[in-house]
Image (spheres, rainbow, N blue to C red):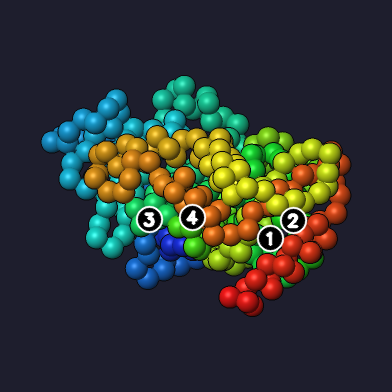
Amino acid sequence: MSTRLSVRTAGLTLDLEDMTHRHTASLARATDTGTCVAITDPDVRVLVERRHHMFRTTGMAPVTRGVWSAADTMVIDSVGGSGFSQLWRCHEDHLEVRARWTPSWLERGATVLSNRRDALRGQVLLHYPAMWWAVTRGYAPLHVSVLEIDGVVAVLAGPGGVGKSTLVAQALDRGARAACDNVAVCDGEVAHGLREPLRLAVADGGPASGARTTHGRRELSWDRRVPTLRPDLVLVVRRGNGPRVRAIDPQHARRALVAGTYAAGELRRFWALTALLGLATGHGPVLPPVDEVAQRLTSRLPCFELELGQTPGAGLHTLLAPHLANVGRQEVAQ
């Protein structure tokens, strides 16, 4: 017997089977969803096995320390220091990932804190497989929020901790829809959200209850979620003496998109994993096309900067009202 988790994330369908029964509950929280029966023909299949020893690598070629490959298959020891050894196999129409819990004593100690352990588990068992399979199809991960306000879709860029999640939460309370709060995969035309809960700091008006996660935040389930949105504008968020909104040069917006993505802690382990997978399997780029996608977005969309104040102020509906109206008129003219 096993437990299952099925979810649509990063523009793909993912089915996880947990033969240990130990991880499904925390993984359901990591995707803000519930357990369910297997979906038909998923794009990504993840199997968490009961075995507690490394995968056999006999006949496989060593790639680097703890990594082996053969044809379309890669074995990696303790992905991202998570304690999970994994076998990744690329099929013509889907990705298969098998995982075994094989931590060293040091890795057991490093993951003793439940919030760090759960974050790593969600990354290596769910988010990274889905994102990488999307990357092999021409998408790039972006550290952004993507939401629809009054019929206009905004991409919110900026470094972690600048206040994007608080803005998203306020907008959702006023009827907005969102594809993601934290990470999307994008090809420059459409953005597919990575399915996660909202993560809000209590000091910024976040919930006092909910699962604890990193950086003193709490996880909050949210409705009004849509899997995919087509962006209409790019909004770079920063702290300052605002609130105020101004138009900015597309290259400034592009730089913020790229820098915020590569600096994101949630993606820190993903870059090395992508390089190893590209090298070992021959599938996908060794570096996701983050800059190219950011260039496509910012070269065709109006770009603005939102300078926030030191204390919470007006929400996005109010701050962006005149700009949303202008974007709407431009769409009608086209």
Q: Which residue lies furthest to the bottom in this view?
A: 332
Characterize the local packing of mark 4: few (<14), some (14-19) or many (20 or more) Cα atoms within 10 angstroms.
some
Mark 1 or mark 4, which is nearer the start of the sequence?
1
Q: Is mark 2 on a helix, strand or loop?
A: helix
Which residue in the structure is indicated by mark 2? 169
Between 93 and 230, the one nearer to me in the picture: 230
Q: Position of residue 91 (x, y in %)?
A: 25, 57
What amino acid is found at the position of numbered circle 3 in the picture?
Gly
Mark 4 or mark 2, which is nearer the start of the sequence?
2
Based on the displayed image, in which of its 4 quarters is residue 100 positioned?
A: top left
Q: Residue furthest left?
A: 59
Which residue in the structure is indicated by mark 3? 138
Which residue in the structure is indicated by mark 1? 222
Mark 3 or mark 2, which is nearer the start of the sequence?
3
Between 177 and 215, the one nearer to me in the picture: 177
Mark 4 or mark 3, which is nearer the start of the sequence?
3
What amino acid is found at the position of numbered circle 2 in the picture?
Ala
Characterize the local packing of mark 2: few (<14), some (14-19) or many (20 or more) Cα atoms within 10 angstroms.
many
Quick check: 278 above or below 130? above
Mark number for residue 142? none
Q: In which quarter of the image is the C terminus?
A: bottom right
Q: Is mark 1 on a helix, strand or loop?
A: loop
Q: Nearer the viewer, mark 4 or mark 1?
A: 4
Q: Residue at x 31, y 60 (%)?
A: 94
Between 78 and 187, the one nearer to me in the picture: 187
What amino acid is found at the position of numbered circle 1 in the picture?
Trp
Residues at marks 3 and 1, CA–CA distance in whole angstroms: 29 Å
Mark 1 or mark 2, which is nearer the start of the sequence?
2
What amino acid is found at the position of numbered circle 4 in the picture?
Arg
Residues at marks 3 and 4, CA–CA distance in whole angstroms: 13 Å
Mark number for residue 296? 4
Residues at marks 4 and 1, CA–CA distance in whole angstroms: 30 Å
